Image (tube, rainbow, N blue to C red):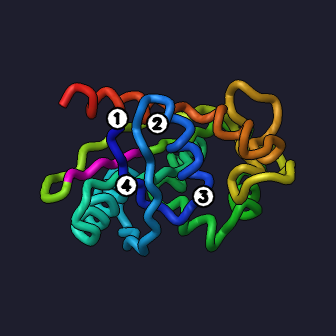
Amino acid sequence: MDKIIYVTTNDFKFKVAKENLEPLGLKIIKKSIDCPEIQADTIEEVAKYSSKYASDYLHENTLKNDSGLIIPALKGFPAAYTKYVEQTLGVEGILKLMENINDRTAYFIEVLAYTEYGKEPVIFVSKTEGSISLEPSGKYGWSWDFVFIPKSADKTLANFNDDERWKFWDNNAYKEFYNYLKDK
């Protein structure tokens, strides 16, 4: 069984990685290190930088996940600035910005960046489609979970516990990553 060093401080991201990759025969090992999160225009740039940093720091092959919320009616905002917006405007601020907007379409881009030590990162992307609710609801999860309604659901992610919530996410990036490793 191949082992993958998954760099995150987020227990939910680690759970999702394990749920997607361990059934395929990959052993997922969590390492928590502080990776700088650069300010960049794309989620892909942020993920690549973090993964390369982690690989260089640990002297190991690493997998890093970065994601961002995209709201087309807000011209794609917050995108690569999702974490910053969460810490400043927050969920209530986004709802305020969307008060008079009828098109509440939104999606998350999730980027897995895999870096073989000494090499440049390779990325794999998933897109989870949905919409932004009119008000927060639910009791599980954090932040955007309280306002993001996945396309295949009729309520926010925060209405589903961890064992249910991860199943709403598009896991295409994990499949592509596994196929990449398998084909090497």
Q: Earlier in the sequence, mark 1 or mark 2?
A: 2
Depth check, mark 4 against mark 3: the one in front is 4
Q: Position of residue 33 (x, y in %)?
A: 42, 72
Quarter of the picture containing the C terminus is top left
Residue 110 among those drawn in magenta: no
Quarter of the picture containing the N terminus is top left
Q: In what element is the residue under mark 1?
A: helix
Q: Are marks 1 and 2 in contact (CB under 8 Å)?
A: yes
Q: Quadrant of residue 167?
A: top right
Q: Are marks 4 and 3 in contact (CB under 8 Å)?
A: no
Q: Earlier in the sequence, mark 4 or mark 3?
A: 4
- Name the residue beneath numbered marker 4: 5
Q: List the single residue furthest toward the front.
A: 1
Q: Earlier in the sequence, mark 3 or mark 1?
A: 3
Q: Nearer the viewer, residue 6 or 99?
A: 6
Amino acid carrying label 3: it is Asp
Region rendered in magenta: 111-116
Q: Position of residue 35 (x, y in %)?
A: 38, 71
Q: In what element is the residue under mark 4?
A: strand
Residue at mark 2 to residue at mark 4: CA–CA distance: 12 Å
Amino acid carrying label 1: it is Phe
Amino acid carrying label 4: it is Ile
- Name the residue beneath numbered marker 1: 177
Residue at mark 1 to residue at mark 2: CA–CA distance: 9 Å
- Name the residue beneath numbered marker 2: 21
